[in-house]
Amino acid sequence: MKKKLLAVFFIFVFTIASYAQVITIRNPKTVPIKLLRVSKALRDLPESAPTERQLRGRRLEHENPALEHQMKIVNENALPVGADPALQRNNEMRTAATASANILSTWTGLTAAVDPSDNTIAVGPNHVMQMTNSDASSYIRIWSKSGTVLVNNITAQSISGVNDYGDPNLLYDPAADRFLFVTLFSGSASKLVVCISQTPDPTGSYYVYSFNTPNGFPDYPKIAVWDNSYIITTNSDSPTIMALDRSAIIAGQSMGTVQMFSLSSFPTLGFQSASPVTQTGNLLPPAGEPAVVIRVADDAWGGSVGSDHLELFQVSIDWTNSANSTITGPINLSTIAYNSNLCGFDNGNCIRQPNTSRKLDPLSDIMMDKVQYRNIGDYESIVCSHVCNADGLGTAGIRWYELRRDISGNWNIYQQSTYSPDTTGRFMSSITINQNGTIALGYNVSGTMVSPGFRITGRDSCDALNLMTVDETVATAGSSHNSSSRYGDYNGLVTDPVDGSFWMTGNYNVSTSWSTNVVNFSFADCIVAEVLPVESSSQHIHIIPNPSSGQIIIAFDLPVNETVPLQIFDATGKIIFEQTFHLQKENVSLSLNLDNLSNGFYFLKMSAGKDITFQKFIIQR
């Protein structure tokens, strides 16, 4: 009976996945990966700040002209027509009170003579590491958590020994306690460089690896960690997924193998890239769970795309025998209709700026960096975001999603919404989640009255679904426009592995050249009365459905026949329901009608033997 009830719960709450035309691909391409060198310690490398001449004469980052950001309207009947139906129109605050983000620190970040900036960040237990593009090689800065600069303006070239074409992407691997990054290799049009710290100290030495990418120029590389692999995706001749042997890379082995898969391309798109999902936090995914790669699909891109959806690909890598490695997908998760067309698909520059006719490129056809996975304990979550046309009139907003795995092991959309509280453009988003289930969303802003800068919002796990409830907070304000349309290809937003706060790196303009800041912030936790103690139990209670419109089923295991008192508290700690049940052992289910409760979050308390269990649930109508 318990399993049946759980199945009903997930059908009720989640968007159902479509598994039509899902295929499994085997026998990936394999290419060798080679250890080029072990670098000197970063703290001993010379600083290489940009010169005044370089800052006056900015250049565009190297890219493959065949892979530029171009889209053409193929489906004239694409949905939605008009405003985004998932637009958050009710900008209600968090459940108990209005709250803004708490800015804990703000540090001056890197700058360089190149567009776009390509901000990326990684945070470990003791260090914060930032990278951006530069005029000759990607720049690196490392701070202690107290804000002391430990490594300043060194180049990726000084680590790898080879020049790079930029597109840096940083990652902190929490299980290995290592920092790593990927950059484009300038010595070849089809090669990547991967560097990983030898120890948990990112200011020390790095193993430097390089490998060829036979699918063509590996533009826009994104790196993630999952189980026994590092996963890299690129915008190559076709969207490409690559897996590196994690244990071999960490150990600094001299030679190894990279396994590669290719995805089919969407029609009409010149720029295509999937996004790897990276595991964060101390709780790993269940053993054997495949890695996930995600991309977003708009029905405007052609009839073969179908209705708007997310595409998930499950990647299983066998490092003993590559013939056993597979990629399965696409698993299509239907989304609320969205519109990727901001200002005409043939013109990618859409975001307005003050005092100039120059507009900024929002990158409205891809899932933005990074896609984050977290095992919360009671559930597994993936958060991701992309840019869309929020009002149907060209205003850029952020469509964000939280996915959860159901009891059958399938990923489904748990909640989604488009954030655009006014006509200012919001773009270049990044999203993350902490162990409390609190979600942070950061993004650039720009408009006719707003200079380019970046802002943040978020939500707590106790808030009503589909809403960003934290007051939008200015992380760093701009005061000038940017001289180039290529403002950035991504920002970085990650969760601190120690305290669950959030760190973001983003662009802002005080001149016609971008600057960056690094901002550490947090949100107030869900307000729970002190009279509600935090206690654990060996019992595992399921409240079905959760959120609920009023009728709930409580399902749990009971080892012996027992009299069980049950209480429900509101957020202030007031008891609003109390009853004792005489129950038989084994699988138990209780049905309660709570139609009289207002929308909000509540706590259920059950006492069985010496165990006391608290379980949070939400009423939402």
Image: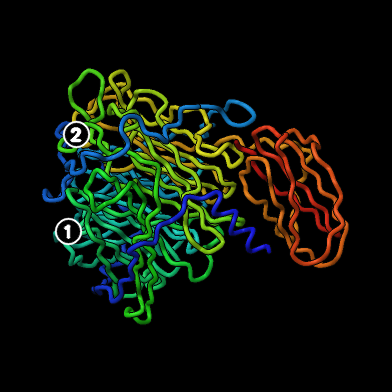
Residue closest to the eye, 366 or 172: 366
Whichever of callouts 2 and 1 sits on the residue coming sooner in the sequence is 1
Between marks 2 and 1 in the image, the one whose residue lies nearer the viewer: 2
Residue 207's label in the rendered image is: none
* Placement of 484 over or under 126, stated as above or below: above
Q: What amino acid is at disc 2?
A: Gly
Q: Counting other residues with Cα less than 10 Å from the Cα at mark 2, is it few (<14), some (14-19), or many (20 or more)?
A: some
The residue at the far left in this view is 65
Please, what secondary structure does the residue beneath circle 1 have? loop
Please, what secondary structure does the residue beneath circle 2 have? loop
The quarter of the picture where the C terminus appears is top right
Q: Counting other residues with Cα less than 10 Å from the Cα at mark 1, is it few (<14), some (14-19), or many (20 or more)?
A: many
In-image side of 138 versus 534 (left or right)? left
* Placement of 575 over or under 309, stated as above or below: above
Look at 56% across and 46% down and name the residue there.
Answer: 437
The number of numbered badges drawn on the structure is 2
The answer to whether the residue labelled 2 contacts the one labelled 1, judged by CB atoms less than 8 Å apart, is no
Residue closest to the eye, 579 or 245: 579
Way the structure is coloured: rainbow
**x and y percent of residue 357 in the render?**
17, 22
Residue hosting label 2: 344
Q: What amino acid is at disc 1?
A: Asp
**x and y percent of residue 10 in the render?**
56, 54
The quarter of the picture where the N terminus appears is bottom right
**x and y percent of residue 524 in the render?**
60, 35
Visible residue check, residue 50: no
Look at 81% across and 48% down and name the residue there.
Answer: 566
Visible residue check, residue 600: yes
Residue hosting label 1: 237
